[in-house]
Image (spheres, helix red, strand yellow):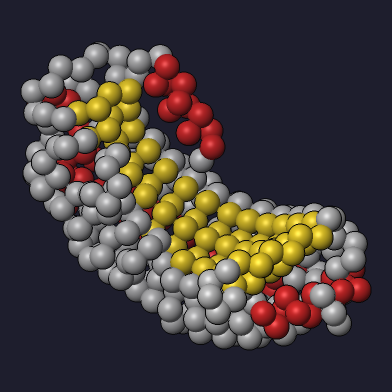
Amino acid sequence: MHDLVDYIAEAVVDGECSTIVSHSQNISKYVRHIALSDYDLSGKELPRSLADYSMLRTIFFPVQGVGLTSTSFVIACISRFKHLWLVDLSDSCFEVLPNSIEELKHLKYLDVSANAYMHSLPNAICQSQSLQTLRVAYYTKLEVLPSYTENMINLRHLYMTTRQDVFSDKVIGCLRVLRSLYTYSCKNLVSLSDGLQHQTSLRTLTIVGCPRLTFLPSSMKYLTALKRLSTIDCEELTLLEWQDIEALERIEVSECRKLFSLPEGMHGLTNLKVLTVDSCPKLSEACQSMDKSKINHIPKIILTEYSSNDLIFVWVFI
């Protein structure tokens, strides 16, 4: 993901990027990365100015909160631009991502986040062996992830929101080179997948807005490369299981108000550099009293509280 960002930043300097605002706009023959700004997003055809640009690498829509309304446009892009690396369809309003997405053999980054209409992803997406980043998060109606992820052999970053109560062990377990996993607003989620035990390359795990999640699974002890763990706005979370993840460097716990104490064995996390506890009153209190001996070895501890009049109290121990 970072390699792609660096590549596009370099392309801007080299004049390989252009913003399209009209059908007839003239663009340089060297352009490889296109932003569609103020373009008719309900249109069913490509801008005429792109007719001869089959070697495009990137298509995205730079106006936040505004995306495509037509699947036909996506189909046209896939048909015309077979060498796309990055496709950002976030904030779109179409219901179906076409199966032809599998024809993009070079696709590395796909973002279909913040789509309020799409209920499922086509299994064809699982044929994208080059895909490194998949974003299907924020306010989606996505029921489940595709079942056949074993072919997604290069997927490193997954951002998702689904209606599942449990993530499939098979789906998560097959993603063997995953580096970061972000779950957002999974309102029905009661348990993470035991497939996590296969994620020995995972470095970042972020769990946000999962109100029914009550515990983190014991299989997390197999996340031997995990460096950063964040649990945010998980109001029913009462049990933490991270004491065996020795590689951890940063832990953030926020708005998990039913947490009363840290797990035993915290002293074994010798690589832990920063512990942040935000808006967890009982846990913050424990960190300053009965759990203090568990965290004395941590170089930086940040405890944040909000009072009834919205004043912020921050304690930083270094």
Question: Closest to the observer: 220 or 36?
Answer: 36
Return the x and y of residue 17 as percentages of the image width and height. Answer: 33, 23
Question: Closest to the observer: 228 or 78?
Answer: 228
Return the x and y of residue 61 as percentages of the image width and height. Answer: 27, 40
Return the x and y of residue 5 as percentages of the image width and height. Answer: 48, 33
Question: Closest to the observer: 155 or 38?
Answer: 38
Query: Residue 164: which quarter of the image?
Result: bottom left
* Left or right, residue 184 beside residue 79: right
Query: Residue 176: which quarter of the image?
Result: bottom right
Q: Quadrant of the C terminus?
A: bottom right
**Residue in view at x 85 percent, y 79 percent:** 289
Query: Residue 187: which quarter of the image?
Result: bottom left
* Left or right, residue 157 beside residue 299: left
Specify whether residue 218 is in view.
no
**Residue in view at x 14 percent, y 45 percent:** 41
Question: Closest to the observer: 162 or 276?
Answer: 276
**Residue in view at x 46 percent, y 66 percent:** 184
Specify whether residue 230 is in view.
yes
Return the x and y of residue 124 as percentages of the image width and height. Answer: 33, 55
Rendered view: 103 above or below 182: above
Rendered view: 55 above or below 82: above
Rendered view: 258 above or below 88: below
Rendered view: 218 above or below 201: below
Total number of numbered discs in the rendering:
0
**Residue in view at x 44 percent, y 82 percent:** 188
